[in-house]
Image: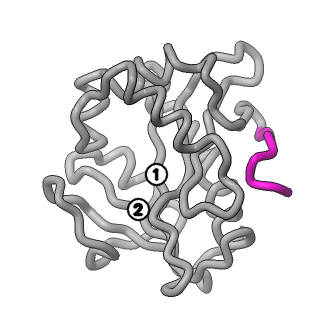
Amino acid sequence: MKLSEAFKTERLHFRLLKVEDIEVVYRQFSDPEMCKLFSEPPCSYEEALEIIEHYANPEGKGHHRYGMFDIETDAFIGTCGYHYWDRELKQVEIGYDIWKEYWRQGYMSEALPVLIKLCFEHLNVDCIYILTHPHNAASIASVHKFGFEVCEPCRSVDEESQVCMSLMRGKWSD
């Protein structure tokens, strides 16, 4: 499988973001409530377009993001992917965001196994980690279900404090 190929789970369709997705990407990353959980300021329309362009051609890059869409309605659910892929240390940071109307409906529990498998198999890393806002209990609980454990930060961040959780290859069972 190439990283740019679309794929599906039971309820979700994953594909590269396109310029035609600008409205939902802008909505996602400009919403103040959502951005508090990202520890990022709300983005402008131009910055939303830059997000799409940044993740347009993932092959061989250290970052990739999929748009997640409902299979039945094609509604935009959110994004997931990886960034800060360190080939030398064999570790990668993953991230995801679910539009608030879809919170607590099990979408990340469906998407995370696919994302974890992709990172271990296609990126050949030994460690996958996530940085999350300390008040994002739902996110912490989601990754904990898959074996992620709180650890020392895997990289330094300038933003406000983050909880770092990691999963080692030897602790993952798909």
In terms of secondary structure, what is the magenta stretch mainly? Answer: loop
Callout 1, which amino acid?
A: Gly
Residue closer to the observer: 174 or 123: 123
What secondary structure is found at the residue carrying circle 1?
A: strand
Q: Mark 2 to mark 1: distance in Å?
A: 6 Å
Residue 16 x/y as whole percent: 68, 37
Instruction: Please tell me in which quadrant of the rendered image residue 76 appears.
Output: top right
Residue shown at 58%/37% (left/top)? 107
Q: Which residue is mark 1?
A: 95
Q: Which residue is mark 2?
A: 130
Left or right of residue 62, residue 45 in this image? left
Instruction: Please tell me in which quadrant of the rendered image residue 48 appears.
Output: top left
Residue shown at 27%/40% (left/top)? 37
Figure disc tally: 2
The magenta span reads 1-9
The C terminus, quarter of image: bottom right
